[in-house]
C-alpha cells in the first residue's frame, strides 16, 4: 500500500492494513480498523458510516488528523 493506511473489500469481507501502521499509536491503528469495518455497514462515507465512527470512537476526527499529519514511508521499487 503506497498511499493508504487501510483498505477493504466489503463484498469479500477483507481488510488490508498498511504494515507501517503498526509503528503508529494504538489509537491510530484502532481508527483505521474501525474505519474499514464501518465500510461493512456502509461502503460510502455517508451518515450511516459516520454514525459508526461517532458511536465507537467519538474522537475519531482528531485521531484521523493526527495520523494524516504523519508521513507515509518512502517506497522504493526493488
Image (cartoon, rainbow, N blue to C red):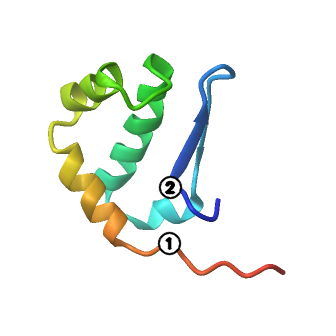
The secondary structure type at the circle numbered 1 is loop
Q: Mark 1: few, some, or many residues within 10 Å (few <14, many ≥20)? A: some
- Looking at the image, residue 52 lies above or below residue 17: above
Q: Which mark is residue 10?
A: none
Q: How many marks?
A: 2
Q: Is residue 53 left or right of residue 73?
A: left
Residue 20 x, y percent position in the rendering: 53, 66
Q: Is residue 69 left or right of residue 39?
A: left
- In the figure, residue 60 lies in which quadrant? top left
Q: Is residue 73 left or right of residue 56?
A: right
- Quick check: marks 1 and 2 in contact, CB under 8 Å? yes
- Looking at the image, residue 70 lies above or below residue 31: below
Residue 18 x, y percent position in the rendering: 57, 57
Residue 21 x, y percent position in the rendering: 48, 60
**Residue named by callout 2:** 5
Q: Mark 2: few, some, or many residues within 10 Å (few <14, many ≥20)? A: many
Q: Residue at x 66, y 19 (%)?
A: 11
- In the figure, residue 28 lies in which quadrant? bottom left
Q: Residue at x 59, y 36 (%)?
A: 8
- Looking at the image, residue 60 lies above or below residue 5: above
Residue in front for this viewpoint, 74 or 26: 74
Of callouts 1 and 2, the N-terminal one:
2
**Residue named by callout 1:** 72
Residue in front for this viewpoint, 13 or 39: 39
Looking at the rendered image, the quarter that the N terminus falls into is bottom right
Amino acid at each position: 500500500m503506497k498511499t493508504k493506511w487501510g483498505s477493504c473489500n466489503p463484498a469479500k469481507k477483507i481488510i488490508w492494513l498498511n504494515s507501517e501502521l503498526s509503528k503508529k499509536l494504538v489509537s491510530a491503528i484502532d481508527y483505521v480498523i474501525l474505519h474499514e469495518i464501518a465500510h461493512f455497514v456502509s461502503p460510502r462515507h455517508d451518515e450511516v458510516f459516520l454514525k459508526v465512527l461517532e458511536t465507537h470512537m467519538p474522537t475519531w476526527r482528531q485521531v484521523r488528523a493526527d495520523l494524516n499529519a504523519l508521513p507515509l514511508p518512502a517506497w522504493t521499487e526493488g
